[in-house]
Image (cartoon, helix red, strand yellow):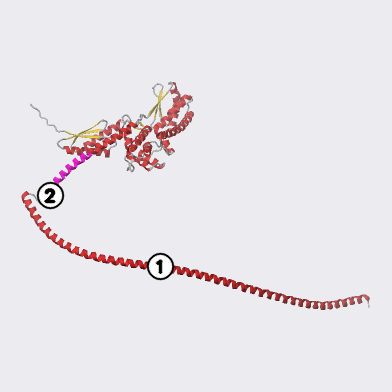
Amino acid sequence: MNPMIITIIASVICLAVGLVIGKILSKSKAKVIDEAAKKEAELIISNAKAKSDTFFEKAKAKSESIKQSKILETRENFIQKKAKFEEETSERKERLRQKEQQFKENQQSISKKIEENSRKEKELDALKSNLSEQVELMSIKKEKVDKQHEEFVSKLEKISNLSATDAKEELIDTLKKEAKTDAMSHIKQIMDDAKAQANKEAKKIVIQTIQRTAAEHAIENTVSVFNLESDDQKGQIIGREGRNIRAIEAATGCEIVVDDTPEAIVISGYDPIRREIARLSLQKLTADGRIHPARIEEVVKKTTKQLNEHLMEIGERTVIDMGISGLHPELVRYVGRMRFRSSYGQNLLQHSRETANLCATMAAELGLNVKLAKRAGLLHDIGKVPDEESELSHALLGMKLCEKYGEHPAVCNAVGAHHDEMEMRYAISPIIQACDAISGARPGARREVMESYLERIKELETLALEYEGVDKAYAIQAGRELRVIVESGKVDDKRSEELSFEISKKIEEEMTYPGQVKVTVIREMRAVTVAR
């Protein structure tokens, strides 16, 4: 055989023998490993069993401790609730006992009241029976008296030849006349006494007030005169084809009148502030010498700004001089605007200052709030100066402005009621009205337009002529007195007094006038015979 083949066969045999031996060895090794694993598993199981026994013992001990603690806690809660229950039960028992006691007391008092009511009922029954007997007796007596009265009336009717109704009417008329006569005499006496005392005290207070307050009155018109250094400046102001003067009028809202008056031109306008702006602007333009439309607009704007600042300064200075504090800045500006306003020719700021001083003096005399009175006196005509137009009267508009800017209700009411356009709710309100009238009625303080003056005079006379028995009526002393001449045959002396009173009341209700109007009724009887 080939040695190579033998080698291969030998190798195969060796390999097979090796495989067999390896398999045998692996089986024995696996058996050894299996036994070791079993031992290890038994050891682990024994250890686990020991640990589980230990854990169980610990858990059992812990559960016992928790059980004991819960039992103790439950016992304590039970004890607390039991104590609380016993306490509440005792309180309820106490309340029940008190209620029972109160109930017993109430029952006793009710029983007493029942006894008293029964006693009173018995007394009332006795009184009722007694009254019924008296009523029966009175009815009997009344019947007798009525019968006697009828007999007496019939006898009187026969004697006087008048029925009962006629006699009653005549008696009533007589009593009415007597009562009316007595009432008129009492009214006249009371009014005379009241007038004497009131006039005395009022004159005293007013005279003292006027004496303490003296103010100059400035009369202002609707025109302002601007003086020029020479007539040559008129041409500069007019400008080429009048463009300068048209620019001034457009910027200021005033009419510039250039006439033959030497070295003067007239500024016409109803707004005094606009007239003042125009005057100051012309003063600056003539001093500078540069007069043309662009320059005019620039100067007017600057002047307007400066004048507004000046108005604020005037208002602040006025408020400081009057000793008034806490006034709203807008109201201060309105006070400054009063400087360039007028009422019936009277400067509004001077009038308001004078009214404020009069109010302060009169309030001090009467023991009222001086500060509020002075404040209301200064602001009473504030409704005349706002920029915007309003349908309200100046009194009501002034009240709205005062309310808007946080003034005291007494001040607002005094401002709104000083022309009787609303109810006077505060003591200072009539003082403001009286002081406003005093300031306006002083000689030389105001001037009226002729047409309104004549209309008022005619209205006075017409009002008096409407009454029956009035023959003639004359308004004298600039409308401060009304002389009424009546027919002596139609109006007696008592009716004259009544007529004077009625006319004065009607004038107060229907007319508006400064100061007061004296009504004098004249009744004269003349007998004329001619000897021939």
Q: Which of 106 and 323 is in front in this view?
A: 106
Q: 10 Å neighbourhood of mark 2: few (<14), some, or many (≥20)?
A: few
Task: Please tell me whether residue 190 belongs to the stretch shown in magenta.
Answer: yes
Q: Is residue 38 left or right of residue 86?
A: right
- Mark 2 sits on what residue? 168
For the magenta stretch, what is the residue range? 164-191
Q: Where is residue 264 in the image (x, y as percent from the top left)?
A: 40, 23
Mark 1 lies on residue: 94
> What residue lies at 37% left-to-right and 67% top-to-bottom?
99
Please tell me which residue is depicted at 86% across the width and 78% down the height of the picture: 17
Nearer the observer, 438 or 249: 438
- Distance between the alpha carbons at the discs numbered 1 and 2: 80 Å
Q: Do the residues labelled 1 and 2 touch (CB within 8 Å)?
A: no
**Vertical placement of residue 357 versus 259, above or below:** below
Specify the principal SS of the magenta part: helix
Residue 209: image location, x then y, percent: 33, 33
Residue at 22 percent across and 36 percent down: it is: 464
Q: SS at mark 2?
A: helix
Q: How crowded is mark 1: few (under 14 residues within 10 Å), some or many (20 or more)?
A: few
For marks 1 and 2, the one nearer the N-term is 1
State the mark number for residue 147.
none
Residue that extends furthest to the left in the rendered view of this protein: 159
Residue 229 is covered by the magenta coloring: no
